[in-house]
Amino acid sequence: MKAVYWRPHKVSRVELSVIAIVSVLLFAGVEQLKVTEEQPYLSTKLEAAELAAQAIEVLRAARLGLAIEIDATVDPAQSGLLGEAMSPVTSDVGSLIAKQTSVNPNFAAVVVHYLKQVGVMPGDVVAIGCSGSFPAVNVAVYAAVTAIGARPIVISSVAGSQWGANEPRFMWPDMERVLREKRVFDIRSEAASRGGVEDRALGISREGRGLIDQAIERNGLTALKPENYQQSVEARMRLYAEKANGPIKAYVNVGGGTTSVGTKVGKDLFLPGVNRTSPRGLPVDSVMSRFVNDGVPVIHLVKLKRIALENGLPVAPAVAQRVGQGGIYYRERPNRVLALLAVLVIALLLLAFIRRDFGARLFRRRLGQDTGPAAEPMV
């Protein structure tokens, strides 16, 4: 009688290849056949972006009316909202890419998204800290609160970093006044500070400080003149409370205003977008930390490249952006039905493979010859 030996059942390469190829094809199909999904508050976002686009065009015309040229190498979108590399009222270094990224009316839709995320409704009070460093973002914030119907309370700082609103004849208070006169926004800063170091423009020349003061005066704004950093924080918080005369729903900070963010340390510790808690180890008192510690959510509009990428907006676009462009309005997502079908098909193929192997094992058990893994007889 011949001895019977057994060897493990070989896995069919053909079967594995078929399963692998089908899986790859199904995955590719799910990736290619995505569905477009409308994002929340679409009509409000579009309204805000339209207002921002109108504001940008009005400010561009106003700048040209003052015979201030637009440098296409700095401002390829020809927005008129980017300033000089250096001027007497420049407060700090700045990122040209960030400034170019900010000149996009669709940023107003992003601000709407953030405000709605923290529950801002028509009639709610929103405290705002504007900066001369990012006039285009100031415009986006004004457009967003106007479209929502919220009540803004604004305190501005005037000095701007590189490529901000640092043209002495056309600074942020001038821009705000033009937008009000042209009936784009009915918003006016309750007060304005010099900005810069300690909110007192330290490090800016006497000439520059004089030009900043003139901009505040010619636009009829109340000047904040703190003697030190702490006085600036206290004055801003007191003014917000007085003007609100009730609860404040959110605080929006634009840029890196010293007393708003808590020096450069606070600027980096708070996250871009919505902040509901104060960062651990924040060593400096600030307007943002005061609000968030009182339970008021803070919307921190810095690191604009990151915000743009997270919301499907271009970085430093070379052309003017049209309203309605970007993932903030519509996003593509995988087709859930197709993805489920793909998973089911792969599962069925695997099940068929397992059942086939299990059947071979069961057959051998019935013969009383199954001594281990699936095997094939050898004589």
Image (cartoon, rainbow, N blue to C red):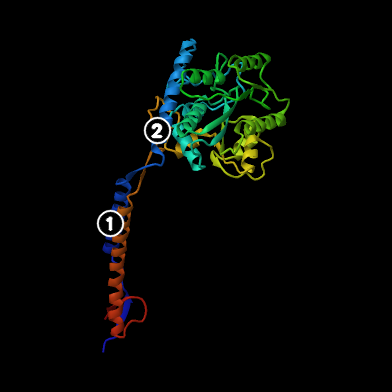
Marks 1 & 2, CB-CB < 8 Å contact: no
Please, which residue is most extreme toward the bottom here? Answer: 1
The answer to which quarter of the image holds residue 369 is bottom left
The answer to which quarter of the image holds residue 244 is top right
- Per the rendering, the mark at residue 46 is 2
Task: Specify whether residue 72 is in view.
Answer: no
Q: Which residue is nearer to you in this view: 153 or 52?
A: 153
Quarter of the image for the N terminus: give it.
bottom left
Image coordinates of residue 22 in percent, x first then y, are 28, 56
Give the residue pinned by disc 1: 22
Q: Earlier in the sequence, mark 1 or mark 2?
A: 1
Please, which residue is most extreme toward the right here? Answer: 227
Q: Mark 1 to mark 2: distance in Å? A: 42 Å
Image coordinates of residue 18 in percent, x first then y, are 27, 59
Image coordinates of residue 238 in percent, x first then y, are 67, 32
38 on left or right of 110: left
Quarter of the image for the C terminus: give it.
bottom left
Task: Specify whether residue 31 is in view.
Answer: yes
Image coordinates of residue 241 in percent, x first then y, are 64, 34
Amino acid on which disc 1 is placed: Val
- Tell me if mark 1 has few (under 14), some (14-19) or many (20+) residues whose alpha carbon lies within 10 angstroms of its own: some
263 on left or right of 143: right
